[in-house]
Amino acid sequence: MVRAAVQVGPRQIELREFPRPQVGPDDGLLRVEANGICGSDVETYKGHMGVHSGPFVPGHEPMGIIEEVGERAAKRWGVQPGDRVALEVIVPCRACHKCLTGRYQSCPHRSIAHGVTGVDVEPSLYGGFAEHLYLTPNAVLHKIDPSIPAEIAVMFNPLGAGVRWAAHLGGIGLGDTVLVLGAGQRGIASVIAARAAGAGTIITTGLAADEHKLALAREFGADHTLVVDGDDAVDTVERVREITDGEMADVVLELTPMAAAPLTDALLAARHGGTVVLAGLKGNREIPLRTDLIINRALTVRGAFGVDAPAYAEAIALIESGRHPLEKLHTHTFGLEDTALAIETLAGEVPGESAVHVSVHPSS
Ligand SMILES: [Zn+2]
Ligand SMILES: [Zn+2]
């Protein structure tokens, strides 16, 4: 049997056992070493995401060791039992026009998503908060050096976001001034990626309660950190004007959840011809936007949906390089039975705990 954390309703997670999946020639079985937690896990836990119709195993950032793999799957994936791999969330069909032209994240034939698919779909084990995860034939795998501590290796997901947003969508070039709005784990990951991409000046914003995260952002390469609320709040746009001598930012990343004001700040803080990447979801609300700013400043505004294979590959290379003290980002490790507590800790609901990167380690 395989133990898994199953979400059965808002804020309701229970441990259940499922039969260990049988592996055929085209599929495999992963022993989950670690699964990271992000803001969307918190929203899902609270019941805000609305994509689940029944019980499911959450956890969409799984990483672990190949325990069993079918003969054809081993060839297709290029893996053997004992290899460590990270999984992408989406399982595309790999054959339709969208898949073949690199837009596999919008594959219309994707049926399975890790951490989303319900337990009614056999063999039920599609989420990372479980001792084992079923590797369905079209799963997208990335190998990671097994000698790296699990809580660091599992940062492939937030770092992948940083690479995708800062380097790929932001197109950061040597010496560019970069403004990162938001200092969560993905904000800090964006600072790391911006540094690696050759950014000049990096400015990060955060809330007064996020001082520990802003300190980490400075440690990973932010030159200026701005507190935007409370008694010492500064005006982000004015500070960027001062710091850049009026040149403003080449690239702005808007990563704040829910808040509307940072969107306008992002447009105002970008230079003429600059790029603004939007990755902070606002709960599907309609938000007033000064579109004249986009026109008059000739801005490129890009929406960031998920992380793709090239970004994961570069993020894993960043991790394997050992050049960044990523252990400083990791604050909490939990066992499978404490999955709910892990999510609440990242959510900031546990008094006295300041979380940045939190992971659940189901099979340790
Ligand atoms: Zn996530
Ligand atoms: Zn497809």
Image (cartoon, rainbow, N blue to C red):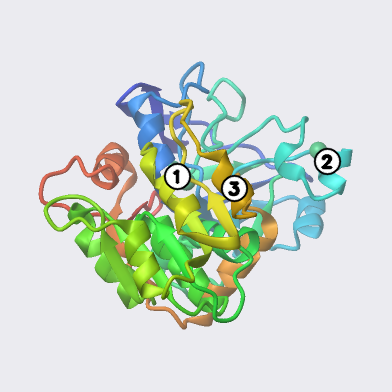
Residue 165 % position (x, y): 56, 57
Horizontal side, residue 338 vs residue 51: left or right = left
Taking depth in this image into account, of 205 and 158 the one nearest to the observer is: 205
Label 3 C-beta lies within 8 Å of the nearest ligand 1 atom: no
Disc 1, SS: helix
Disc 2, SS: helix
Q: Are marks 2 and 3 in contact (CB under 8 Å)?
A: no
Residue in the picture at 31% in, 24% down:
12
* Residue hosting label 3: 294
Taking depth in this image into account, of 173 and 50 the one nearest to the observer is: 173
Measured in 3D between alpha carbons, the distance from the residue under mark 2 to the one under mark 3, in whole angstroms, is 30 Å
Tell me, for residue 216, which label it has, or none.
none
Q: Earlier in the sequence, mark 3 or mark 1?
A: 1
Amino acid beneath label 2: Lys
Comparing labels 2 and 3, the label whose residue is closer to the camera: 3
Examine the image and state in which quarter residue 297 appears.
Answer: bottom right
Measured in 3D between alpha carbons, the distance from the residue under mark 1 to the one under mark 2, in whole angstroms, is 31 Å
Measured in 3D between alpha carbons, the distance from the residue under mark 3 to the one under mark 1, in whole angstroms, is 11 Å
Residue in the picture at 69% in, 40% down:
91
Label 1 C-beta lies within 8 Å of the nearest ligand 1 atom: no
Amino acid beneath label 1: Leu
Tell me, for residue 98, which label it has, or none.
2
Residue 50 visible? The answer is: yes
Horizontal side, residue 290 vs residue 75: left or right = left
Label 2 C-beta lies within 8 Å of the nearest ligand 2 atom: yes
Taking depth in this image into account, of 56 and 188 the one nearest to the observer is: 188
Disc 3, SS: helix
Q: Quadrant of ligand 2?
A: top right
Examine the image and state in which quarter residue 184 appears.
Answer: bottom left
Horizontal side, residue 358 vs residue 105: left or right = left
Residue in the picture at 57% in, 29% down:
117
